[in-house]
Amino acid sequence: MRLLSFLVAAGLLAASSAFAADPVGTRTIELPAPARRATLQVMVWYPTASVGTLVPSGKDKVFKETPALKGAAIAEGSFPLILISHGSGGSIANLDWLATRLAATGFIVAGPNHPGTTRGDSTPLDTTKLWQRAADLSDVLTALSADPAWAPHIDGKHVGALGFSLGGHTVMAVAGVRVDREAYARYCDEERTMADCVWFSSGTVNLRSADKHLFEQSNRDPRIRSVIAIDPSVVRAFTAESLRSIDIPVHIINIGRPETIPVAVRSDDIAAEIPGAEYQTVDGAVHLSFLAECRPEAPDFLKSIGETDPICEDAPGKPRTRAEIHVQMAAMIEAAFLADFARRE
C-alpha cells in the first residue's frame, strides 16, 4: 500500500478504508467518438469498495486474463485518470495486467479498442491514419468527463496517457509530437524489414499517398499532463521542432538492451530532444513482453492458426519470466505518474 499512501499524502486520492484490499472493478462501455462519427468500445478499470468473486471470462485462447469485479460500483472520491492505447493489431484487453495494477493503486484507467488497428480488424491502410487514434483518446477523455456516472470520480487536474508500440506514438501525439510523412516514407524505403514497413508493404500501402494535412497535423490535447510511451513506433518520423516544444513530463521506455532494440522503436535520440524527458530501458525482455502473459496452450494454438509473430516468446535464454518483467514495468510506470502528478500539486 506504499504507493496508495503516497497518493493520499499528496492529496491525489481521498483517504478511505475502501482501498484496504485494493479491489478493482471493470466495465466495458460504448462512448461517442465524434471524430469517427461512430462509437468506441472502451474498457475502464477503477477502484471499488465492492467485494465478490474474481472470475476471468476465459474467452481469450492466447492470453491469461487478469480478473476484476465486473460492473462493480466505483469507490467514493475522485481519482487520477490514465488513458491507455494498445499497439497495432492488439486490443485493450491485452493490457489488463497493467490496468488492474494501476487501478489497485488508485487510478481510473480507460482505453479504447482503436477501430482499424485492433486485433481482428487491423488493416495496413487504417494503420496510416495516425490522427484517428489520437482523436480516440481525446474523445474518450471528453466523454468520460461529461458522463455523470464517471465525471464526479475523475480528477481532471491529473490526467495521464500511456501507450505501447503504435499506442506509444498515439500518446506522444496527444503530448504534441508531429510527424513528417516524407520522413516516414523514406524510413520504410530504407528499412524494409522493420515490422511496420512490412505491414504496410503487405497491403500495398504507399505512405506518400496518406493525407498529408491530416498525417502531419497537431493532435495535442492540453488536458493530458503526463505521458509514458513504451517502445513507441513512428519515431523516425517525429519532427525535431515538435519534440522540443513538448511542455509536459514525458517518459519513454524501450524494452531490451540498447543493441537489441529495433530502429523502428529505439527512442534514446528522441528523448534527448524533449525538454526534461526521462529515458529508460528494460533488460532481459523483448518488445512483445509487454503483452499479457500467454496461456500454456497458446503457442500450439498460435501455430495452428498460422500466426508467425513470436507473441509468447521473451528474451533468448529466458533470463526472466514475463510476470517478472511486468512487475518491474508496472513499478516504473506507477512511479512516473505519481511523481509527475505530485509535482503539479
Image (tube, rainbow, N blue to C red):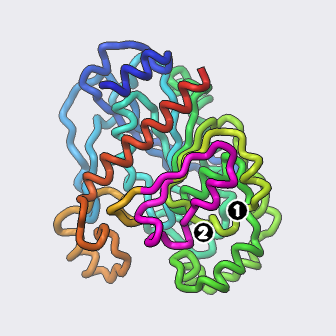
Q: Quadrant of the C terminus?
A: top right
Residue 40 disc label: none
Q: In front: 330, or 294?
A: 330
Residue sitting at 44 percent across and 62 percent down? 90
Query: Element type at marker 1?
Result: loop
Query: Element type at marker 2?
Result: helix
Asked if 6 appears above or below 60 in the picture, the reply is above
Whole-Å distance between the Cαs marked 1 and 2? 16 Å
Q: Quadrant of residue 3?
A: top left
Q: Residues within 10 Å of mark 2 (few under 14, many from 20)?
A: many
Amino acid type of disc 2? Answer: Thr
Residue farthest toward the right in the current orientation of the protein: 213
Query: Start and end of the magenta stretch?
Result: 253-281
Residue sitting at 69 percent across and 54 percent down? 273
- Residue 31: percent from left, percent from top: 56, 42
Of the image marks 1 and 2, the number of the one nearer the N terminus: 2
- Residue 95: percent from left, percent from top: 39, 51
